[in-house]
Image (cartoon, helix red, strand yellow):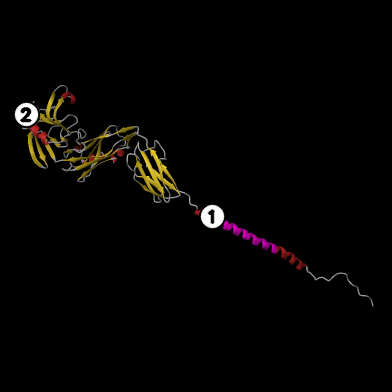
Amino acid sequence: MGVPEISNRTERPAWSRRGILAVLGAVPAAVLTGCTESADASEATAASAGASASTKAETRVKAPTITVTPADGTKKAGFTSPVEVAVSDGTLSAVKVTGNDGSTLAGSYDDARTKWTSSENPYSGTKYTVTAQAQGAEEETATFTTKSPGETFVGYFTPEANSTSGVGMPVSINFTKAVSDRAAVEKAITVTAEPAVEVVGHWFSDTRLDFRPEDYWAAGTKITLSLRLKDVEGTDGVYGTQSKDVVFNIGRSQISTVDLAAKTMTVERDGAALATYPVSGGDADHTTWSGIMVISERFKETRMESSTVGLGDEYDIADVPHAQRLTTSGTFIHGNYWASTSIFGSSNTSHGCVGLHDTKGADDTAVDGYKFYKSSMLGDVVIVKNSGEDTVDPANGLNGWNLSWADWTAGSAL
């Protein structure tokens, strides 16, 4: 019997290839899982930190910034544009703009209250202080000074302030410089009446603008002329200087009608006959203007020279009594002491004026010249008819009533 073979190898479990690969594969799987879990934790931490930083950034509000136009400290700012106050990163709660003359500029905010704009332009030659405050912030202050205009113009007006005139007195304005932007100038001037009536302007020239209603003013009317010409550019580089209100009054109604065919003048006061006077008008070679005329000047005595109206040396009278001007060209209604009493009411013998019997010295209260002068005032209406002459030019004196309402309104620039 043979001796059995004894192996020197220790018995080991049997491992299949598949099992070995499975084990080998298990280790990397565990490591990847571990790595994956570590990455997720880092990302979560980073995300948390990022969220925290974002939250802090969101809660950190920017301070509002206020900007003023013209800029703070400007010495020669323009005056033809409004003042603006704007804010970024906030809203405006209050804005005030005050001039060194005590005036203030009104204005309005936009819907978001991020911008305020003055409703008018600043005045020239004025220092302004702007105080502005954003919601939740401190008040801020800025200053600027507007430049002075180069050339200027003014408007001289008729009648005089606080005067009382007849119902025919227009508001007449004569400018010291020719106006090229008529609309801008007319827009800056308003004439209002109490009792109310429509009043419209009419340009007779580049230097003259008159205002009137359709019919004569009502007796007792209060008229207010509002001039807002300051810094209005009438022509290139030429600005107005006036900003004021002027009041005048209309007295009783007196309308006198001169009929040079009948050689009489009938005076009506508040619609009732007051007096009838015999008169003498212009002769055939020197006819009197016809039409509606307004008394624009009054003199107890004045000198009249024919040379001033283009009639050579035909006359020179130093003391014409009770003279009242009807036209710029030299038509008057006046007293006459040098002609025979018999011509009044019977002959037209003058050089174009309307004459009433009077005496030298202008002190005789019994004569017609004195009586009519005493009853009259600036702005009274004198209507001349049957003179043999054309209707007076509406610009010749304060005689715009000779224009129809349609023609009058057509002369407005607005």
On residue 93, which mark appears? none
Overall secondary structure of the magenta section: helix
Badge number at residue 54:
1
- Indicate the secondary structure of the residue bearing disc 2: helix
Label 1 – label 2 distance at C-alpha:
108 Å
Q: Nearer the viewer, residue 39 or 2?
A: 39
Quarter placement of the N terminus: bottom right
Residue closest to the eye, 213 or 33: 33
User: Which mark's residue is nearer the viewer, 1 or 2?
Assistant: 1
Mark before the other along the chain sequence, 1 or 2: 1
Q: Which residue position is annotated with label 2?
A: 343
**The image quarter in which residue 76 lies:** top left
Image position, residue 242 (x, y; %): 29, 37
Q: Residues within 10 Å of mark 2 (few under 14, many from 20)?
A: some
- Quadrant location of the C terminus in the rendered image: top left
Which residue is outermost to the bottom? Answer: 1
Which residue lies at the image location 8% right of the left edge and 39% below the top edge? 274
